[in-house]
Amino acid sequence: MRAGLSLLCLTYVLSQFYRAFLAVLGPALLRDLGAGPEDLATASGLWFLAFALAQLPIGWALDRLGPRRTVSSVLMLGGAGGALLFSVAGSALHVKLAMMLIGAGCAPVLVSAYYILARQGSPAQFATMAALLLGIGSIGNLGASWPMAFAVETVGWRAAMVLLAALTGAAALALFMVVRDPEAPEHGRRGSVLDLLKMRALWPIIPMMFACYAPAAAVRGLWIGPYLSDIFGLSVTQLGQASLVMGIAMICGTLIYGPLDRVFGTHKWVILVGNLACGLSALALALLAGTSAAVGIALCAAIGLFGASFPVMIAHARGFFPAHLAGRGVTLMNLFGIGGVGLMQLASGGIHAQVAAGAGALASYQVLFAFFGAVSLLGVLAYLFSRDAPA
């Protein structure tokens, strides 16, 4: 189990990289392909939506076929294939198609690790181990900041994408050789996603799952770059450094969240307080967006720090899943979490364009950040009605 989990964790670095690297590619893609911020917002949103929509078939495949065949084949076809398509993109449309493929290809990586943990690990340690996996994998978030900016300026974005395609293909082959499937669950027990959706305990968790990751993922994955470039004129290297700061904050947040449920004996209140702070940070950024680049970066980092409750959210929901639906349960929650990012990222492009056309760039970012803050606080409101899972 350990070797497979370790390799899945390392492979998750690529998944985190792919969801965040557009933040520093903006100037190069605008110059070479004419792809502006709205195009990149759509491309980013499509990555998350493809990732989310792949969760249900992946959940079925994990329960029926096991993680070994599922993750290796999907990552090879979608991840490596999409990165190759990106490297030869001739228009914004090609970028969007490539991001959809990459998103679908990355979809089984983390949930395969969570599936193995849910089937073979201790429920009491699930949140801590899940957060550790996510935190280590989030090194990819750092790679998508200054290192990617350096690669773009050194060898160009097309050569960088070819190298990424090769790394992704190699990771898929390694997963096929190393990952071992858990023993099959008890025979005779059948079920579906509908059985999970009928569970009332999950109903108030789902809206928070939908909202918890969106502010951090949307800002780090794209908007921190255009915001700091348009409002304060930061260079590509400076954008990479700012993205690096936010990426580090997200890793720290993930590692801090992980053990807190065991420290305080509750998932609910750890998640609720953290996401309340995330929503308020986004609203503060909306109010102070034009103050200075330092203030903007600090508040983006706060959004990343407090918006890192994703693994604890999975752990909260996981406490209600029956063993024979562990795969579909984890992927269902992932669908809502990643799908929320995708839908809000798609909406963000339209919000930015519409407000910018009428009120200017600064107002467009203020409205955008207020939108993310409001969504987070609405999720917190629904989550107030949740209850902690049985021990």
Image (cartoon, helix red, strand yellow):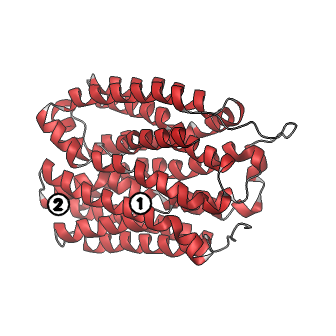
The image shows residue 335 at horizontal and vertical percentages of 58, 46
Residue under label 1: 215
Label 2: how many residues lie within 10 Å, few (<14), some (14-19) or many (20+)?
Answer: some
In the image, residue 278 above or below residue 118: below
Label 1: how many residues lie within 10 Å, few (<14), some (14-19) or many (20+)?
Answer: many
Give me the disc on residue 231: 2
Between the C-alphas of marks 2 and 1, the distance is: 19 Å
The image shows residue 89 at horizontal and vertical percentages of 28, 25
The image shows residue 195 at horizontal and vertical percentages of 79, 48
What residue lies at 73% left-to-right and 58% top-to-bottom?
A: 320
Q: Is residue 208 found left or right of 182 in the rendered image?
A: left
Residue 329 visible (yes or no)? no
Between 337 and 37, the one lying in front of the other is: 337
In the image, residue 14 above or below residue 146: above
Indicate the secondary structure of the residue bearing disc 2.
helix
What residue lies at 41% left-to-right and 51% top-to-bottom?
A: 136
Q: Amino acid at mark 1?
A: Pro
Chain-order first, disc 2 or disc 1? 1
Q: Is residue 34 found left or right of 375 in the rendered image?
A: left
Q: Is residue 326 found left or right of 298 in the rendered image?
A: right
Indicate the secondary structure of the residue bearing disc 1.
helix
In the image, residue 145 above or below residue 377: above
Determine the image quadrant of residue 307.
bottom left
In the image, residue 130 above or below residue 4: below
Residue 2 visible (yes or no)? yes
Q: Amino acid at mark 2?
A: Ile
Quarter holding the N terminus?
top right
Between 199 and 247, the one lying in front of the other is: 247
What residue lies at 64% left-to-right and 52% top-to-bottom?
A: 121
What residue lies at 51% left-to-right and 64% top-to-bottom?
A: 258
The image shows residue 347 at horizontal and vertical percentages of 42, 51
